[in-house]
């Protein structure tokens, strides 16, 4: 288990689209709409996002949210009658963002409290942001895969 990578596997037995090329093109189009560079070799889609920015205005729009998924790959294989989709996302930018935010929260907390408490607040903030980021990445990857495999998702 690598702490700097998040992996997932989905085994899909029932699906409406039987062609792997169609699923690959749908995933590629969806990644391109999220402003990610894609490269397809064999049955592996490699992706990476270009920009890292904080949105202006409301956080309700998912397309303009802070980009945590920086780079990774999606592997699509057909084994028998089932479809195996494996994915990997690198977490280095998530850790960097969580570390920066925890330092800021620790510094702000140290203005009013002692050092031990501000260090604890920084660590708790770091862990909470990493957990929230990992959950968000899993939700986005599941949504990406399910919307590409199922027609009415």
Image (tube, rainbow, N blue to C red):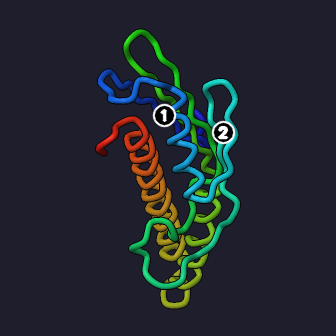
Within 10 Å of the Cα at label 2, are there few (<14), some (14-19), or many (20+) other Cα atoms? many
153 left or right of 29?
A: left
Which tag, 1 or 2, sits closer to the chain's start?
1
Q: Residue at x 66, y 39 (%)?
A: 46
Quadrant where the image shows the C terminus: top left
Q: Position of residue 55 (x, y in %)?
A: 55, 77
Instruction: Please identify the quarter of the rendering in which residue 59 is found.
Output: bottom left
Image position of 44 with respect to 106: above or below: above
Q: Which residue is mark 1?
A: 23
- In this view, the residue in front, 34 or 104, is 34
Q: Residue at x 63, y 72 (%)?
A: 53
Residue 61's tag is none
Q: Which residue is mark 2?
A: 46
Q: At numbered mark 1, what does the secondary structure look like: helix, strand or loop?
A: helix
Residue at mark 1 to residue at mark 2: CA–CA distance:
14 Å
Image position of 18 with respect to 71: above or below: above
Q: Do the residues bearing badges 1 and 2 touch, measured as CB atoms within 8 Å?
A: no
Q: Residue at x 56, y 70 (%)?
A: 102
- In this view, the residue in front, 39 or 89, is 39
Q: Position of residue 49 (x, y in %)?
A: 66, 56
Q: Residue at x 56, y 58 (%)?
A: 34
Q: Position of residue 141 (x, y in %)?
A: 46, 45
Q: Position of residue 63 (x, y in %)?
A: 49, 66
């Amino acid at each position: 288990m690598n702490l700097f990578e998040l992996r997932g596997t989905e085994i899909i037995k029932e699906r409406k689209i039987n062609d792997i090329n169609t699923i690959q093109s749908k995933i590629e189009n969806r990644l391109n709409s999220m402003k990610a560079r894609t490269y397809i070799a064999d049955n592996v889609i490699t992706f990476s996002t270009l920009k890292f920015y904080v949105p202006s205005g409301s956080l309700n729009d998912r397309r303009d949210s802070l980009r945590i998924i920086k780079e990774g790959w999606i592997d699509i294989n057909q084994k028998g009658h089932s479809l195996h989709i494996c994915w990997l996302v690198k977490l280095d930018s998530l850790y960097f963002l969580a570390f920066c935010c925890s330092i800021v929260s620790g510094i702000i907390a140290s203005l009013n409290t002692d050092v031990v408490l501000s260090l604890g607040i920084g660590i708790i903030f770091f862990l909470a942001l990493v957990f929230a980021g990992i959950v968000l990445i899993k939700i986005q990857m599941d949504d990406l895969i399910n919307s590409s495999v199922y027609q009415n998702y």
